[in-house]
């Protein structure tokens, strides 16, 4: 039935929330009493409107039924058997420069067959981080054929850049194409789709500048090693992004049919942990050993127990490795790789402080030595609000629906670091997946190769190209983008 259950704040001390003795005291305070009465007054006003306003009451009931319907469909993901040719219901209204969007649509549609061939070629030749030599050559050859000025091996061995300039001056649009795959399971994160999306956006922007005589520049950056190699961060440090006014890219994931997601992603802190012990015969004289594998197992267990006390939005996960282990030998070494993730970098830092003692305690208990080495930190994704609003507007009126739940909300990307440093937009887009076949599964590798995934990739590319062309053509809009970036940056601090 229709209901309302608001919370109301009362003053509490640190670590004194609900179900603590501190909260018992807080609930007794005069200030809490006054806050309770304020909330009660507001609830009474709402209740009296229910009693006296029939139209309002009917609206409440209608909203209840609509919410119930949405709940029923909330977790309906796009499956391979769904008919994606059935067009979604779109909103009415105007968009910015429909003449530009017409050129963008036509340009990308005309490239679909060639992009599909490139897509499958990349998918069929998966390469690990910093080893993307085949992809490097395939992308650069393709872009040279379509009239871009291409620099191979740009700043990093497998990175590249393709540029197109029309006229003099003008604003600069940046776009990213990722290339790397995953060990053993290939393109299970859909970087073949991300790569061709960047190409599609750049080609569409080039076509719009040529056909409509628009001054500006597009820079398409081929970025290696997203999967743990922080390729974009290294390219930023070498100056690869310095000309760009804003940077765009996208990422496939499970989600509802026709949906494009403006969710964020998780910040991540990467750790390497090494335990050093002493070997011994595991049966003859085990008391002479100091077991580094036991230390790793104990640390693994410590963290498993810690998880109950960390926020449900946080993630701590890792693996154990070792060298020259044998059944009859007390292991004198072990190595662990761990990721700590949270919705914000600040939250990840807080959980990091709780995880490290889990490793140290294991060393103390087993008599081993531990070395914890902190690797790179990946920031959460900051979707530029102005760029996101523009994408939302064109998607809802021309292509599909916007969601804020799916995308790569539970994963991480090195583009998060870029979005901390300059205005950026990184929407997710849904592709058809099977149950338990999300990113980083073999089933997703198959999904990323499908025709439906290719078509979905081109839809989001059209929307991104439209947003990018507004960056190039509308100075007031770009200023709003930059202002939003500064405002969001100030909010983080």
Image (cartoon, grey):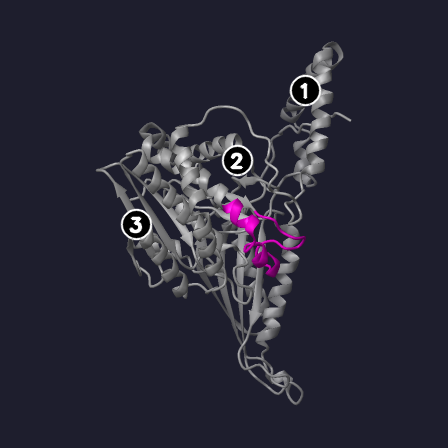
Which residue of the protein is positioned furthest toward the right in this rendering?
A: 1
Residue 132 painted magenta: no
The magenta-colored residue range is 431-457
Which residue of the protein is positioned furthest toward the left in this rendering?
A: 168
Residue 441 painted magenta: yes
Instruction: Provide residue 28's location: percent of width, then percent of height.
Output: 69, 29
7 horizontally vs 150: left or right:
right
Which residue is at a point 67% across and 27% down the rendered structure image? 6
Compare residues 287 and 330 and report the one nearer the observer: 330
Give the alpha-carbon distance from disc 2 to disc 3, as whole Å: 28 Å
Instruction: Provide residue 226's location: percent of width, then percent of height.
Output: 45, 57
For label 3, the residue is 147
Instruction: Provide residue 112's location: percent of width, then percent of height.
Output: 46, 48
Q: State the count of labels.
A: 3
Q: Secondary structure at mark 2?
A: loop
Q: Quadrant of residue 155?
A: bottom left
Q: Quadrant of residue 50?
A: top right
For label 2, the residue is 399
For label 1, the residue is 37
């Amino acid at each position: 039935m229709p209901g309302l259950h608001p919370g109301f704040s009362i003053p509490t001390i640190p670590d004194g929330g609900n179900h603590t003795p501190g909260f018992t005291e807080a609930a007794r305070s005069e200030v809490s009493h006054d806050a309770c009465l304020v909330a009660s007054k507001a609830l009474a006003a709402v209740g009296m409107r229910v009693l006296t306003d029939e139209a309002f009451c009917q609206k409440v009931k209608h909203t209840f039924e609509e919410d119930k319907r949405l709940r029923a469909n909330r977790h309906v993901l796009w499956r391979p058997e769904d008919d994606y040719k059935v067009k979604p219901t779109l909103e009415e209204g105007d968009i910015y420069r429909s003449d530009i969007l017409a050129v963008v649509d036509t340009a990308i549609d005309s490239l679909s067959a060639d992009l599909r061939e490139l897509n499958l070629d990349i998918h069929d030749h998966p390469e690990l981080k910093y080893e993307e030599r085949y992809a490097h050559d395939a992308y650069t050859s393709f872009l040279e054929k379509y009239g871009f000025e291409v620099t191979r091996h740009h700043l990093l061995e497998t990175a590249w850049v393709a540029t197109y300039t029309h006229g003099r001056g003008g604003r600069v649009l940046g776009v990213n194409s990722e290339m790397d795959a995953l060990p053993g399971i290939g393109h299970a994160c859909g970087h073949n789709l991300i790569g061709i999306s960047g190409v599609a956006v750049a080609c569409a922007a080039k076509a719009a500048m040529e056909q409509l005589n628009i001054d500006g520049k597009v820079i398409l950056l081929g970025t290696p090693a997203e999967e743990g190699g922080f390729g974009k961060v290294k390219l930023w440090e070498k100056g690869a992004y310095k000309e760009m006014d804003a940077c765009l890219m996208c990422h496939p994931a499970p989600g509802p049919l026709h949906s494009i997601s403006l969710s964020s992603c998780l910040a991540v802190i990467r750790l390497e942990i090494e335990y050093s012990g002493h070997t011994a015969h595991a049966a003859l004289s085990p008391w002479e050993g100091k077991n580094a594998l036991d230390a790793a197992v104990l640390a693994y267990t410590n963290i498993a127990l810690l998880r109950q006390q960390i926020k449900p939005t946080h993630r701590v996960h890792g693996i154990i490795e070792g060298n020259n282990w044998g059944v009859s030998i007390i292991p004198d070494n072990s190595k662990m790789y761990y990721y700590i993730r949270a919705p914000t970098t600040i939250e990840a830092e807080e959980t990091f402080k709780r995880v490290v003692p889990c490793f140290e305690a294991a060393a103390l208990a087993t008599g081993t030595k531990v070395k914890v080495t902190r690797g790179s930190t990946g920031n959460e994704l900051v979707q530029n609000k102005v760029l996101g609003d523009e994408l939302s507007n064109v998607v809802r009126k021309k292509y599909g629906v916007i969601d804020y739940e799916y995308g790569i909300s539970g994963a991480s990307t090195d583009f998060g670091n870029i979005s901390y440093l300059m205005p950026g937009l990184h929407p997710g887009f849904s592709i058809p997946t099977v149950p338990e076949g999300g990113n980083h599964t073999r089933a997703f590798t198959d999904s990323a190769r499908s025709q439906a995934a290719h078509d979905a990739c081109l839809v989001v590319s059209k929307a991104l190209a439209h947003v990018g062309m507004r960056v190039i053509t509308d100075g007031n809009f770009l200023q709003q983008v930059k202002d939003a970036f500064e405002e969001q940056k100030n909010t983080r601090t």
